[in-house]
């Protein structure tokens, strides 16, 4: 019986080793495929956009204590304010901020935090230009300034060309003169690869 048992072990041992080697080879191959796939996915995924807070270089209104620069100073407790009323109307019927990103970039989204004395927020038009003096071309329309709990995030066209200068433009609605306060402006940008 001992001889028979030894024969059985000697007979099955090579098959066991072959099976073990096959399993190890398959596991190694699967590991390489997984690593290759992970590397490809990493290359295919776009880089996270950079958050860019622009400089404010001009505005329709500039009131003491509520300077335009406060709209993008990184402090949500400060803000650019345009109260409603006849005095503000004499300064300008419409309200606007001209923003400078510092260099040409391709924004993928606009983040806007603020309030407006209108139901449903303010109608804000985002425009771009090659010069801070224009001419201005419309990029997107945003219904923003809905409160201070969270900013309004507006995705922008994927084919938007890199630009340096942008303008937030709020047109006077009918005969009403509303109060607008912008606490923060920020862009999600991809740098111009050119």
Image: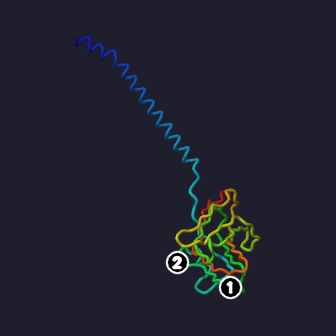
Label 2 element class: loop
The location of residue 156, given as percent across then percent down, is: 66, 61
Residue drawn 64% across the image and 81% down it:
82
What is the x, y in percent for residue 96?
68, 76
**Residue ranking furthest to the left:** 2
Compare marks 2 and 1 and give the one earlier in the sequence. 2
Q: Quadrant of the C terminus?
A: bottom right
Marker disc for residue 118: none
> Of helix, strand and loop, which one carries label 1?
helix
Residue 23 sits above or below residue 93 on the image: above
Residue at the right extreme of this rendering = 135
Examine the image and state in which quarter residue 88 appears.
Answer: bottom right
Q: Which residue is mark 1?
A: 88
Q: Residues within 10 Å of mark 1 (few under 14, many from 20)?
A: some
Return the residue at label 2. 77
Residue at 70% across, 60% down: 161
Q: Residue at x 51, y 37 (%)?
A: 33
């Amino acid at each position: 019986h001992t001889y028979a048992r030894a024969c059985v072990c000697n007979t099955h041992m090579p098959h066991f080793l072959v099976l073990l080697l096959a399993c190890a080879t398959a596991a190694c191959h699967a590991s390489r495929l997984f690593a290759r796939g992970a590397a490809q996915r990493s290359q295919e995924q776009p880089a996270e956009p950079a958050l860019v807070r622009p400089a404010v270089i001009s505005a329709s209104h500039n009131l003491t204590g509520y300077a335009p620069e406060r709209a993008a100073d990184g402090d949500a407790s400060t803000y650019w304010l345009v109260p409603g009323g006849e005095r503000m109307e004499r300064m300008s019927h419409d309200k606007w901020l001209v923003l400078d990103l510092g260099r040409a970039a391709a924004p993928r989204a606009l983040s806007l935090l603020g309030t407006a004395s209108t139901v449903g927020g303010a109608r804000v038009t985002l425009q771009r230009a090659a010069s801070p003096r224009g001419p201005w071309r419309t990029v997107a329309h945003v219904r923003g300034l809905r409160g201070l709990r969270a900013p309004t995030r507006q995705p922008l066209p994927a084919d938007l060309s890199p630009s340096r200068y942008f303008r937030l433009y709020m047109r006077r609605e009918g005969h009403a003169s509303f109060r607008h306060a912008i606490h923060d402006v920020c862009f999600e940008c991809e740098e111009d690869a050119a």
